[in-house]
Image: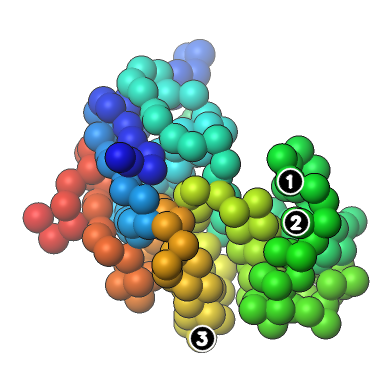
């Protein structure tokens, strides 16, 4: 059983008047339930392209992705809704949910508590620090109990200490819960919280260090 898998995933960007940009040239990836996989690679290697395809935000040119319906996403730029409070932001993914709102509310409260954000529920994102905004985004990613969380350089905008808090939250989420994590990162500390690290290089995934 796998939590998420790809077979020979390819992505080429084409724009009129410009040569095609072949970003992914045959990505094969299997992520097992509860497994945490780090993906590293230089800037422009195609990491965000890959993660967006894994999450269904972008269509591959060819190849297949198998994934659960329920996915959590965390981005480098937080992507919170600026006019919504912390509470409204974390409850947003539950609007299309299968559970009664009350069940989600209990889970959201518990996650906000764990994230040290209980006193910030009524605040707007602009009233929070970067770390608090990202913790809010992590709670939002977890509130519907997804099978897998996809995170694109979630500590990229944060200082080392604050980034470490985010990594701890992401690592804790999979402990004993069977939640899988795919973490795109530049940081060795981030890769260290994962079970294995892959490098995206020349359009394919290779074992890091190989
Ligand atoms: N929508 C797009 N149209 C054309 N080229 C794109 C598009 N999105 C990404 N690219 C190109 O694909 C390559 C990989 O980008 P990206 O996936 O963002 O890399 P990374 O996240 O590893 O830094 C880059 O050369 C980028 O310019
Ligand atoms: Mg990127």
Point out residue 83 in the picture as x, y percentages from the top left corner: 89, 56
Q: Are marks 2 and 1 in contact (CB under 8 Å)?
A: yes
Point out residue 9 in the picture as x, y percentages from the top left corner: 32, 27
| 19 or 38: nearer the viewer | 38
Answer above or below: position of 192 versus 19: below
Q: Quadrant of residue 7?
A: top left
**Which residue is the site of mark 2?**
104
> Alpha-carbon distance for marks 2 and 1?
7 Å
**Which residue is the site of mark 1?**
99
Q: Where ligand 1 lies, by quadrant?
A: top left
| 81 or 194: nearer the viewer | 194
Report helix, strand or loop for mark 1: loop
Q: Nearer the viewer, mark 1 or mark 3?
A: 1
Answer above or below: position of 139 versus 15: below
**Which residue is the site of mark 3?**
161
| 70 or 45: nearer the viewer | 70
> Alpha-carbon distance for marks 1 and 3?
36 Å
Query: Which numbered disc flags the more N-terminal residue, 1 or 3?
Result: 1
| Residue 144 as seen in the image, left or right of residue 193 | right
Point out residue 150 in the picture as x, y percentages from the top left corner: 49, 50
| Residue 209 as seen in the image, left or right of residue 25 | left
Question: What residue appears at the point 18 percent right and 57 percent down from the top-left corner?
Answer: 208
Question: What residue appears at the point 82 percent right and 51 percent down from the top-left corner?
Answer: 101
Check disc 2: other Cα within 10 Å, few if <14, some if 14-19, many if 20+.
Answer: many
Q: Nearer the viewer, mark 3 or mark 2?
A: 2
């Amino acid at each position: 059983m796998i939590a998420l898998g790809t077979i020979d995933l390819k992505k080429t960007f084409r724009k009129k008047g410009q040569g095609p940009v072949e970003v992914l040239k045959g990505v094969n990836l299997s992520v097992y339930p509860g497994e945490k996989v780090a993906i590293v690679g230089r800037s422009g290697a195609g990491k965000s392209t890959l993660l967006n395809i894994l999450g269904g935000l972008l269509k591959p040119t060819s190849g297949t992705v198998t994934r659960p319906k329920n996915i959590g996403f965390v981005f480098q730029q937080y992507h919170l809704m600026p006019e919504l409070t912390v509470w409204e932001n974390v409850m947003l993914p539950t609007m299309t949910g299968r559970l009664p709102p009350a069940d989600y509310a209990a889970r959201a409260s518990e996650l906000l508590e764990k994230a040290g954000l209980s006193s910030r529920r009524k605040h707007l994102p602009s009233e929070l620090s970067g770390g608090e905004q990202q913790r809010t985004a992590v709670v939002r990613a977890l509130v519907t109990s997804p099978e897998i969380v996809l995170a694109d350089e979630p500590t990229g905008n944060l200082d080392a200490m604050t980034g470490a808090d985010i990594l701890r939250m992401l690592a804790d989420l999979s402990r004993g819960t069977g939640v899988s994590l795919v973490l795109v990162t530049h940081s060795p500390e981030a890769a260290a919280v994962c079970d294995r690290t892959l490098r995206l290089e020349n359009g394919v995934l290779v074992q890091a260090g190989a």
